[in-house]
């Protein structure tokens, strides 16, 4: 089960994704480019790398049965808009 939320502010968007799956045993390793737990399948292991490329902040917290991914994107611009 995956749930999520999106909060939009004047100059930033915050996305929270919560996955109630098996969890990620080693988050640091999972965030390495090309890392995959299923190398024999068609997987590139680039999910977190792509998130980090397009977001200003990516935070991942995982324990058995729950993974939380928080994405933050800030936009330049006028505060009056």
Image: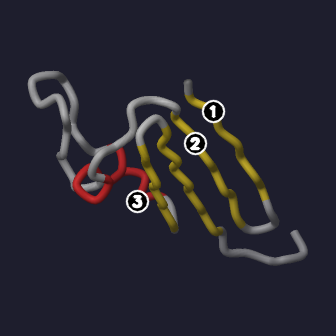
| Image location of residue 4, percent across then percent down | 65, 38
Check disc 1 and report the residue beneath it: 3
Q: Tell which of 25 and 76 is nearer to you.
A: 25
Q: Is there CB contact under 8 Å for labels 3 and 1?
A: no
Residue at the far left: name it: 40
Residue at the far front: name it: 64
Residue 39 found in image quarter: top left
Q: Against 5, is 41 above or below?
A: above
Instruction: Give the position of the N terminus as an image quadrant.
Output: top right
Left of 37 or right of it: where is 16?
right
Q: Against 70, is 63 above or below?
A: above
Q: Is there CB contact under 8 Å for labels 2 and 3?
A: no
Q: Secondary structure at mark 1?
A: strand
Q: Label 3, label 1: how many angstroms apart (C-alpha)? A: 20 Å
- Residue at horizontal 41 percent and vertical 40 percent from the top: 64
Q: Secondary structure at mark 3?
A: helix
Residue 24 found in image quarter: top left
Q: Secondary structure at mark 2?
A: strand
| Image location of residue 55, percent across then percent down | 50, 61
How would you rate the neighbour count of disc 3 (Cα within 10 Å): few for under 14, some for 14-19, many for 20 or more?
some
Q: Tell which of 23 and 34 is nearer to you.
A: 23
Please identify, in this view, whether the residue under mark 2 or under mark 3 is nearer the observer.
2
Residue 23 found in image quarter: top left
Check disc 3 and report the residue beneath it: 52
Q: Label 2, label 1: how many angstroms apart (C-alpha)? A: 6 Å
Sequence-first tag of 2 and 1: 1
Sequence-first tag of 2 and 3: 2
Q: Tell which of 27 and 51 is nearer to you.
A: 27
Left of 77 or right of it: where is 30?
left
Q: Label 2, label 3: how many angstroms apart (C-alpha)? A: 15 Å
Check disc 2 and report the residue beneath it: 17
Left of 35 or right of it: where is 65?
right
């Amino acid at each position: 089960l995956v749930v999520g939320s999106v909060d939009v502010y004047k100059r930033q968007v915050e996305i929270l994704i919560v996955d109630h799956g098996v969890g990620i045993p080693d988050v640091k390793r999972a965030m390495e480019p090309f890392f995959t737990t299923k190398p024999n399948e068609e997987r590139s292991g680039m999910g977190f790398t792509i998130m980090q490329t397009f977001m200003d902040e990516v935070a991942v917290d995982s324990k058995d049965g729950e993974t939380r991914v928080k994405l933050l994107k800030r936009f330049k611009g006028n505060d009056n808009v």
